[in-house]
C-alpha cells in the first residue's frame, strides 16, 4: 500500500473535520505563495486546526531536514536527513541567465550497480516517498528560491521507484508546485516498464536514457541492467515514446578514457541512432565527461579533450545531433555519478 502524500492527508483531514473548502487553498497559499514552513505560523487558520496539522504531520511542512550544504561556483549541494536515519543529496544549479535548475534524488542509494557511479556502490537502502522526493524542492521554495526546472538525476533510478509518478503529479499540480511538464526531466538506465508508463502518463516530460556503450557485452559489464533490458529493446521503447509524444529523447553517454571513447564506439552510436524511422531526428546525444571520486576504481578516467572532440566529429559527420555537456560541481562531488551522501 503506497503512503499518501501530506497534501492528500490534509485534504482528508479537512473533509473529516467538516472544515470549509477554502481552508485547503489557504494552507497551500501559505506554503507555496507565502513560504510558510511551519503549520503553527499559518495564522489565517484557527488555532485548533493548526494544532491538528502539527499533531498529524509534525511541526514542519518539510519532512526532510537539511544537515549540511556545500557550495561552489553556480552549484549548491544539500545533504538531507530522512526517516530511518538515512541521508540523500540534492543539487541546485544556478545558470548565468538566472535560471535555477534542481537535480533531486528518488532513492536512498541505488541497487543497479553501474560500475562508474559512486551512488551505485551504496546499494539500495530504500525508495523515497512522494513527499521525500518533492520536499527536496520544497526546501528551496520555502527559502525563497525560484523553481525553474527539475531533473530526477541525483541518487537512485527514478523509474524503479513507483512513487515517482505520485511525485510528478504533485509537482505538476497547479495548486501546488505548478511546474510545467516540459520543465521536468527523468533520467533512466533503461527500465522498459517505467519508460512505457511514462510515455502513457506523462508524455510531455523530458526523457533521458543512459547508454554509455552501444555494444551489449560491454554495456552489460558497465551497467548490469543491460542483461535484463538490452540496448536494442530499450531503443524500441524509445522509438515508441517518440512516436507517441513527438518529443525529443536524450541519450546520455559518459566518456571513459580508453573504455568507450574510441572511433569504433562513436560510429556504433551513430549507427544505433540512424535509420529509426520518421522520429530519428528527435534523438540527441549528451556527451558527458566522466567525474572521478575516491569511491570509484582508478581504472576509470575522464577522456582527454582530443578524444572527446574526435568522438563529437564522428557524430556530426553522421548527422547525429549532440551536445558536449559542461560539468558543474565536480569540486564538491556534486556532478553526474559522484553523489554518495557523505558528511
Image: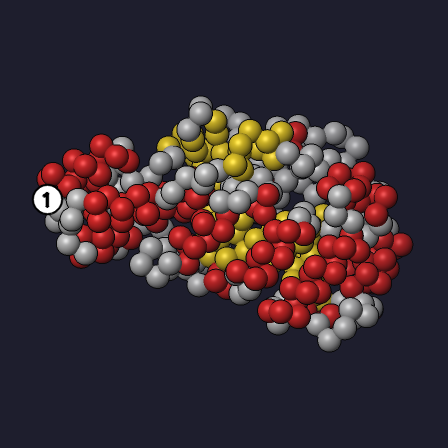
The answer to whether 21 is drawn above or below residue 106 in the figure is below
Where is residue 176 drawn, in percent x and y? 33, 55
x 52%, y 36%: residue: 127
User: Where residue 231 sits: x, y (%)?
Assistant: 78, 52
* Residue at figure coordinates x 73%, y 55% from the top left: 234
Provide residue 194's location: percent of width, then percent of height: 61, 51
Please name the residue that numbered disc 1 is placed on. 46
Instruction: Residue 154 in the image: state x and y as whole percent.
Output: 55, 43
* Residue displayed at 79% across by 32% down: 299
Q: Residue 318 lies in what quarter of the image?
A: bottom right
Q: Residue at x 10, y 44 (%)?
A: 46
Q: Secondary structure at mark 1?
A: loop
Q: Residue furthest bottom?
A: 278
* Direction from residue 178 to residue 111 in the image, left or right: right
**Image color mode:** secondary structure
| Residue 257 in view in this figure | no
| 187 or 161: nearer the viewer | 161
276 vs 339, left or right, is right
State the residue lying farthest toward the right: 264
Amino acid at each position: 500500500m503506497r503512503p499518501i502524500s501530506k497534501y492528500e492527508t490534509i485534504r482528508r483531514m479537512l473533509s473529516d473535520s467538516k472544515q470549509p473548502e477554502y481552508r485547503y487553498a489557504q494552507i497551500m497559499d501559505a506554503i507555496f505563495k507565502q513560504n510558510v514552513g511551519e503549520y503553527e505560523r499559518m495564522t489565517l487558520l484557527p488555532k485548533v486546526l493548526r494544532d491538528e496539522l502539527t499533531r498529524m504531520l509534525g511541526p514542519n511542512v518539510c519532512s526532510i531536514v537539511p544537515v549540511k550544504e556545500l557550495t561552489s561556483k553556480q552549484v549548491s549541494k544539500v545533504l538531507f536527513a530522512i526517516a530511518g536515519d538515512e541521508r540523500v543529496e540534492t543539487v541546485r544549479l544556478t545558470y548565468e541567465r538566472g535560471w535555477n535548475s534542481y537535480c533531486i534524488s528518488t532513492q536512498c542509494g541505488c541497487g543497479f550497480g553501474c560500475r562508474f557511479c559512486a551512488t551505485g556502490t551504496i546499494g539500495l537502502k530504500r525508495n523515497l516517498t512522494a513527499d521525500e522526493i518533492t520536499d527536496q524542492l520544497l526546501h528551496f521554495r520555502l527559502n525563497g528560491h525560484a523553481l525553474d526546472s527539475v531533473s530526477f538525476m541525483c541518487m537512485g533510478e527514478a523509474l524503479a521507484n513507483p512513487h515517482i509518478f505520485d511525485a510528478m503529479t504533485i509537482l505538476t499540480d497547479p495548486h501546488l508546485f505548478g511546474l510545467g511538464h516540459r520543465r521536468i526531466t527523468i533520467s533512466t538506465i533503461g527500465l522498459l516498464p517505467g519508460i512505457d508508463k511514462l510515455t502513457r502518463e506523462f508524455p510531455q516530460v523530458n526523457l533521458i536514457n543512459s547508454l554509455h556503450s552501444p555494444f551489449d557485452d560491454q554495456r552489460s559489464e558497465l551497467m548490469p541492467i543491460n542483461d535484463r533490458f538490452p540496448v536494442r529493446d530499450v531503443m524500441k521503447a524509445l522509438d515508441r515514446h517518440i512516436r507517441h509524444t513527438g518529443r525529443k529523447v536524450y541519450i546520455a553517454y559518459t566518456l571513459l578514457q580508453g573504455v568507450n571513447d574510441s572511433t569504433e564506439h562513436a560510429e556504433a552510436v551513430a549507427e544505433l541512432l540512424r535509420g529509426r524511422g520518421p522520429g530519428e531526428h528527435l534523438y540527441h546525444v549528451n556527451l558527458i565527461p566522466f567525474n572521478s571520486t575516491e569511491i570509484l576504481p582508478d581504472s576509470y578516467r575522464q577522456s582527454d579533450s582530443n578524444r572527446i572532440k574526435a568522438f563529437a566529429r564522428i557524430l556530426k559527420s553522421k548527422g547525429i545531433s549532440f551536445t558536449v555537456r559542461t560539468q558543474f560541481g565536480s569540486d564538491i562531488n556534486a556532478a553526474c555519478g559522484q553523489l554518495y551522501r557523505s558528511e
